[in-house]
Amino acid sequence: MDMSALEDIGLTNAEIKVYIALLEMGATKTGPIIEKSGLQSSVVYSALSKLLEKGLVSSVREGKITVYLASDPKNIIDYIDEKKSKLNEILPLLAAKQSLAKNRTDAVLFRGIRGVKELLLELLDAGGKEHHTMGSPLESTMLGSAWWLSYHKKRAAKGIKGKLLFNESLKEWAKKFGYHDRNTEIRFMAKGFEPLTEMIIRNDKVGLIIWTEKPLGILVHNKALAYSWETYFQMDWANAKK
């Protein structure tokens, strides 16, 4: 008989064995319970104590002897309802703690080409309606043209509009491998300004990629920071060349 549902509601293996033994035997002393369950006496006493607390077993004193009886299995539903009620009482507190966590800054470091790809894929699922890139250098093509094309096709397929502010050094590459769809617009930063650091803003996440020989990426999850960098991006975007 599969009793995994009883484990799912928090009963231990010993508690289940003792409870089933009592259901099958009816009112009985601890001796027969120990024998039928195959558990050590100390384990049986501990299980009985926990089952009494949960209202799944009752006990009656007959002289110096204690007799135990399994309660109606329907009481298990009452036990679950009681746990749900207690959980509902603390849900507002849990939600408040989660809200505080959203205001904290989380930063994750990614190393190498594989790591940077992982960072970019995380940004792909970061939510929001627009994908803003600023400062993409020629070195970013080390990921491969096919990979970048596939990446932005996935982004466009999600209905996310892309505003890509490339370095001037990417102009010829963009002409050859550019993303020609209505969800993508490309502009270029002023000639002569060639930073190796690329910034990508998606929703409340910011990805920073340093395109050295072994690229390094940092993914920062902070709403205020994302808003700040978004303002900076919009200023540069307005002044950039098409």
Image (cartoon, rainbow, N blue to C red):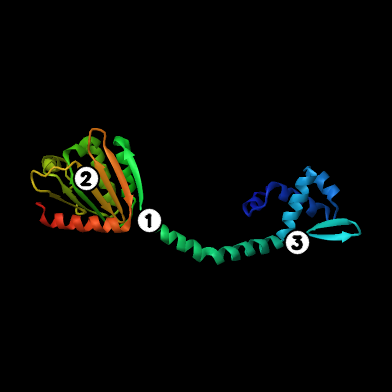
Q: Residue at x 22, y 45 (%)?
A: 198
Give the number of the disc on residue 72: 3
Work out whether residue 163 or residue 24 is closer to the camera in this orientation and state it. 163
As helix, strand or loop, the secondary structure at mark 1 comes to: loop
Residue 156 image point, x, y percent: 26, 51
Q: Is residue 122 above or below residue 85?
A: above
Residue 207: x percent and y percent?
28, 48
Residue 189 point in image, percent of width and height? 12, 48
Residue 137: numbered disc: none
Task: Please tell me whether mark 2 sits on a helix, a strand or a loop.
Answer: strand
Pointers 2 and 1 in contact (C-beta within 8 Å): no
Circles 3 and 1: CB distance less than 8 Å?
no
Which of the two discs, 3 and 1, labels the residue nearer the N terminus?
Answer: 3
Q: Amino acid at mark 1?
A: Arg
Cα separation between marks 3 and 1: 48 Å
Label 1 belongs to which residue? 104
> What type is the residue that disc 2 sits on?
Glu
Task: Tell me the SS state at disc 3.
Answer: loop
Q: Is residue 150 above or below residue 227?
A: above
Q: Residue at x 64, y 61 (%)?
A: 80
**Which label's residue is closer to the chain start, 3 or 2?**
3
Residue type, numbered disc 3? Asp
CB within 8 Å, label 3 to label 2: no
Q: Earlier in the sequence, mark 2 or mark 1?
A: 1
> Residue 40: x and y, percent?
78, 43
Give the label, 3 or 1, closer to the camera: 1
Real-space Cα separation, disc 2 to disc 1, in angstroms: 23 Å
For residue 198, the mark is 2
Crowding at dot 2, Cα within 10 Å, few <14 / some 14-19 / many 20+, comes out as many
Horizontal side of 41 relative to 111 (left or right) equals: right
